């Protein structure tokens, strides 16, 4: 049975890395779910153990924040914010800076995937109408959303997992991860400006969009309720109350609306991502019970690659995040971190999130921007993304490494 569990794990993670299985209409979520089913059906993970393997507090927190994001999206808040920034289109560099700052801030407070989903269509339409080259702005949106989300525990799914499993304090996490996030964001802006110098405008007139998409109209009251709920929730995160309990309570209150049908809100919850999380918890549990991950880490330690070394952890996290994406990478690595050493958890959060900018598959946010842009006949190739993604990631990781070095020197 151990050999079967290993085989299922390898096939599942390879499938998640590639994104598909030839001959089957399966995406990453479907592959992970199939792997979990195989673990249970084969007996490698009994059904009772499978249910216990799912970290319910993390799932509840992620679900609750999706409800909050859905409420803001239906209230037209995201569209309103994006539309307001388009007033700066006559000054492309300032518009790029503003849109990146807004995306980073909202991603730190809400899920970065939702920010990209809401902002990309508005940016595409505004940029094409103005005759601007959409590539630097869309790549800036993806990069800023990834980088900005690294600053807080609730910025992205992997940070939520890290914060929950590591029982990290919201404020201390922000103080540790906030400064390198700001420096990385500044570097990303500079790299984009340099890469696209003289190419912020299109060489020819943009294609006219006859039927622009319909977005939720801005509702001041509904958006205000969502923002107030968000501020209350952040305040509760600084209290001893469990984060998942605070979040699900606020989400329950937001579902009670006289104007927004609960079905509308539920339709915007990313059930695919929740399913991916649950499935990967089960798949990883299948090999953890066989002590395989621990043996792997012991082998690496014998080669001088101990995960307790923060520089080594940064490298392993970066590589693994771009092999299987940062969420599965974080789910695998959190099992080897020491709860008594919060710096390990901070480094994993920053490195796995910064690594998401390296190549397209490194982050779900990248894929969302690319797929949304394609609806407007805007193609972002692997090569085009890598031209800015690689230097942005290297700069961001350099900031992290220098931060670690400075903390070691000052001790």
Image: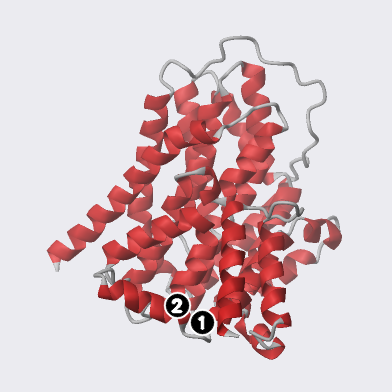
Q: Is mark 2 on a helix, strand or loop?
A: helix
From what the image shows, is residue 219 above or below residue 160?
Answer: above
Q: What element carries label 1?
A: helix
Given residues 51 and 85, the one toward you in this image is: 51
Q: Quadrant of residue 401?
A: bottom left
Residue 134 badge: none
Dot 2: few (<14), some (14–19), or many (≥20) neighbours within 10 Å?
some
Given residues 300 and 97, the one toward you in this image is: 300
Q: Dividing the image into 4 quarters, which one contains the N terminus?
A: bottom right
Residue 246 is left or right of residue 387, and the answer is right
Residue at the (33%, 79%) spot, across then down: 298
Residue at the (61%, 23%) spot, across then down: 127
From what the image shows, is residue 186 above or below residue 148?
Answer: above
Q: Earlier in the sequence, mark 2 or mark 1?
A: 1
* Image x and y of residue 175, in percent: 35, 62
* Image x and y of residue 86, in percent: 60, 28
Whether the residues at callouts 2 and 1 have beta carbons within 8 Å, the answer is: yes
* Image x and y of residue 332, in percent: 49, 71
Given residues 211 and 244, the one toward you in this image is: 211
* Image x and y of residue 236, in percent: 54, 72
Distance from disc 2 to disc 1, alpha carbons, whole Å, reads: 6 Å
Hey, which residue is sitting farthest top in the picture? Answer: 204
Dot 1: few (<14), some (14–19), or many (≥20) neighbours within 10 Å?
some
Residue 284 is left or right of residue 211, and the answer is left
Dot 1 corresponds to which residue?
288
Dot 2 corresponds to which residue?
293
Residue 66 is left or right of residue 310, and the answer is right
Q: Dividing the image into 4 quarters, which one contains the C terminus?
A: bottom left
């Amino acid at each position: 049975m151990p050999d079967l569990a290993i085989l299922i794990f390898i096939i599942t993670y390879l499938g998640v890395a590639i994104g598909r299985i030839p001959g089957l209409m399966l995406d990453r979520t479907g592959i992970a779910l199939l792997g979990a089913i195989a673990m249970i059906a084969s007996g490698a993970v009994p059904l009772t153990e499978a249910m216990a393997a799912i970290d319910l507090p993390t799932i509840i927190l992620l679900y609750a924040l999706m409800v909050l994001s859905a409420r803001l999206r239906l209230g037209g808040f995201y569209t309103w914010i994006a539309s307001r920034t388009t007033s700066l289109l006559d000054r492309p560099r300032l518009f790029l800076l503003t849109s990146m700052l807004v995306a980073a801030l909202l991603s730190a407070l809400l899920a970065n995937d939702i920010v990209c989903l809401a902002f990309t269509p508005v940016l595409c339409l505004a940029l094409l109408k103005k005759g601007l080259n959409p590539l630097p702005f869309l790549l800036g949106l993806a990069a800023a959303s990834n980088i900005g989300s690294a600053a807080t525990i609730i910025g992205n799914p992997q940070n939520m997992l890290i914060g929950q499993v590591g029982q990290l304090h919201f404020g201390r996490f922000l103080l540790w991860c906030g400064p390198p996030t700001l420096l990385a964001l500044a570097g990303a802006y500079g790299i984009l400006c340099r890469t696209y110098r003289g190419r912020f405008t299109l060489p020819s007139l943009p294609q006219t969009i006859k039927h622009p998409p319909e977005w939720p109209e801005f509702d001041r009251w509904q958006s205000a309720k969502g923002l107030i709920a968000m501020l209350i929730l952040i305040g509760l995160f600084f209290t001893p109350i469990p984060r998942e309990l605070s979040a699900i309570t606020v989400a329950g209150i937001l579902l009670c609306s006289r104007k927004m049908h609960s079905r509308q809100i539920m339709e915007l919850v990313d059930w695919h991502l929740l399913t991916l999380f649950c499935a990967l918890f089960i798949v990883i549990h299948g090999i953890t019970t066989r002590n395989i991950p621990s043996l792997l880490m012991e082998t690496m330690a014998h080669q001088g690659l101990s995960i307790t070394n923060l520089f080594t952890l940064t490298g392993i996290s970066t590589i693994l995040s771009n092999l299987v994406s940062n969420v599965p990478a974080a789910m695998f690595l959190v099992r080897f971190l020491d709860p008594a050493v919060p710096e390990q958890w901070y480094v994993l959060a920053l490195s796995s999130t910064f690594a998401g900018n390296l190549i397209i598959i490194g982050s779900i946010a990248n894929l969302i921007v690319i797929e949304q842009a394609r609806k407007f006949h805007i193609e972002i190739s692997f090569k085009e993304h890598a031209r800015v993604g690689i230097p942005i990631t290297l700069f961001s990781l350099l900031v992290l490494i220098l931060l670690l070095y400075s903390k070691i020197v000052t001790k």
